[in-house]
Amino acid sequence: MKLAVFASGSGSNFQAIVDAVEEGRLQAEISLLVCDKPGAYAEKRAQTHGISVFSFHPKEYSGKAAFEEEIVKQLRQQEIDMIILAGYMRLIGPTLLHSYEGRIFNIHPSLLPAFPGKDAIGQAWRAGVKVTGATIHMVDEGMDTGTIIAQEAIPVKATDSLQSLTKAIQAVEHRLYPDTIQSIIEKRTLEGSQIKNEH
Ligand code: GAR
């Protein structure tokens, strides 16, 4: 199973996925990092682990369809099976969605459908919720919508600050995302072998 991870920033989730592969907890190959912010720290992490990077400036293309066509080309070259969004702060357009239908996943730092979009942890913090969390879902054309695959709740403690809450959510994300990707792969491999056996 060949994965491409998409990131726009620090890439700590990307790192957690790479670590899980290197430790054998995730049976996949991370073949490509796609980054829409050249110079982002995620790129450095990829270089450290010998992972190819496709990084681009969206503004240098005529629009989303144009840069997504280029991304699809890169993904096909690397024979990518699955796309893992890890802090890729951009809506996926029809070009990518149709090319990888049902094979694009995202992580979001809230209990969706609460607090979609940017700064989900800050949104939850300002709303004063007592429980928040992390969600992994399939990607559709919406903003942090799509079928929910896994969720974990995290209590907001009276002693928490925005910073400590952010840390707690990230710690959950770094465990939940690799584990969930492994479950998805196992389920699909099983389904694939069942389909083959029926023929
Ligand atoms: C993560 O917390 C991820 O859930 C969030 O961006 C952060 C990226 O951090 N994604 C979204 O908000 C998507 N709407 P990272 O670059 O350190 O992995």
Image (cartoon, helix red, strand yellow):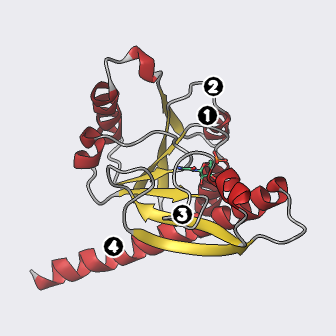
Residue at the spot of label 4: 188
Q: Earlier in the sequence, mark 3 or mark 1?
A: 1
Viewer-proximal residue among 79 and 136: 136
Residue at the spot of label 1: 43
Residue 102 located left or right of residue 137: left
Q: Disc 2 residue type?
A: Gly
Separation of residues labelled 1 and 4 (CA atoms):
29 Å
Separation of residues labelled 3 and 1 (CA atoms):
30 Å
Residue 64 coordinates in the image, percent (x, y): 33, 29
Q: Earlier in the sequence, mark 3 or mark 2?
A: 2
Viewer-proximal residue among 159 and 24: 159
Mark 2 lies on a secondary structure that is loop
Residue at the spot of label 2: 39
Residue at (18, 78) in percent of width and height:
195
Mark 3 lies on a secondary structure that is loop
Separation of residues labelled 3 and 4 (CA atoms):
29 Å
Tell me if label 4 and label 2 are in contact, CB under 8 Å: no
Separation of residues labelled 2 and 1 (CA atoms):
7 Å
Relative height, residue 99 to residue 177 (above, below): above
Q: Earlier in the sequence, mark 1 or mark 4?
A: 1
Q: Disc 3 residue type?
A: Ala
Residue at (51, 36) in percent of width and height:
52
Which of the numbered marks, if any, corresponds to residue 114? 3
Answer few, some or many: residues within 10 Å of disc 4's Cα (few below 14, many 20 plus, some between 14 and 19).
Answer: few
Q: Residue furthest front?
A: 127
